[in-house]
Image (cartoon, grey):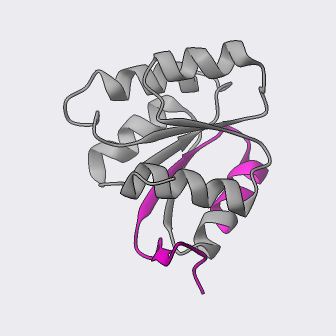
Amino acid sequence: MAQQIDGKVWQGKSVLVVDDYPAVRKTIKEFFSAMGLVVSEAVNGVEALEVLQGRKVDLVVSDLVMAEMDGFELTEMLKNNPKFRGIPVVILSTHADSKYIFKALRLGADDYLIKPPTAEMVNIVLARVFVHEW
């Protein structure tokens, strides 16, 4: 059963998880799948852009530190591209320092979660990005 917050179910929403570590992608994929989201994966920003060319997603959740194209670059590219700028971007990182958080938000990230996320925090972020509620 999909988890809910305030009666809202995330069943059927799609998310692209971008992280260079397979074990992290697997864990996050299982986490989001259990919440009812359809999950796609990419290993870095370059692959994420390729995935987005071929499929519509409702949300991008990206790590920051990755080879080829990091989460900062991916966020900036998505938010500067008319085709993708409407897709919410949430950074999911171990970096809890405010300089990382503020940089991600300045580049257009819609929210920032610290790894490992709790179900409660993810639900709050999903409510905020999907239905604009806290």
Q: Over which residues does the magenta segment extend?
A: 1-30
Q: Nearer the viewer, residue 109 or 17?
A: 109
**Residue 9, percent from left and from top:** 48, 76
Visible in this render: residue 67?
A: yes
- Assign the N terminus to one quadrant of the image: bottom right
Left of 72 or right of it: where is 122? right
**Residue 118, percent from left and from top:** 76, 57
Residue 107 in magenta stretch: no
At a point 51% along the width and 56% down the height, the residue shown is: 126
At a point 59% along the width and 72% down the height, the residue shown is: 35
Left of 90 or right of it: where is 93? right
Q: Nearer the viewer, residue 42 or 108?
A: 108
**Residue 72, percent from left and from top:** 54, 20
Where is 35 relative to 114, above or below? below
At a point 34% along the width and 43% down the height, the residue shown is: 87
Q: Quadrant of residue 48?
A: top left
**Residue 71, percent from left and from top:** 56, 27
Q: Quadrant of residue 43?
A: top right
At a point 55% along the width and 21% down the height, the residue shown is: 104
Where is 79 relative to 40, above or below? above
Looking at the image, how many numbered discs can be counted on the residues?
0
Left of 52 or right of it: where is 7? right
Q: Nearer the viewer, residue 62 or 50?
A: 62
Where is 47 relative to 106, above or below? below
Where is 121 relative to 91, above or below? below
Q: Residue furthest bottom?
A: 1
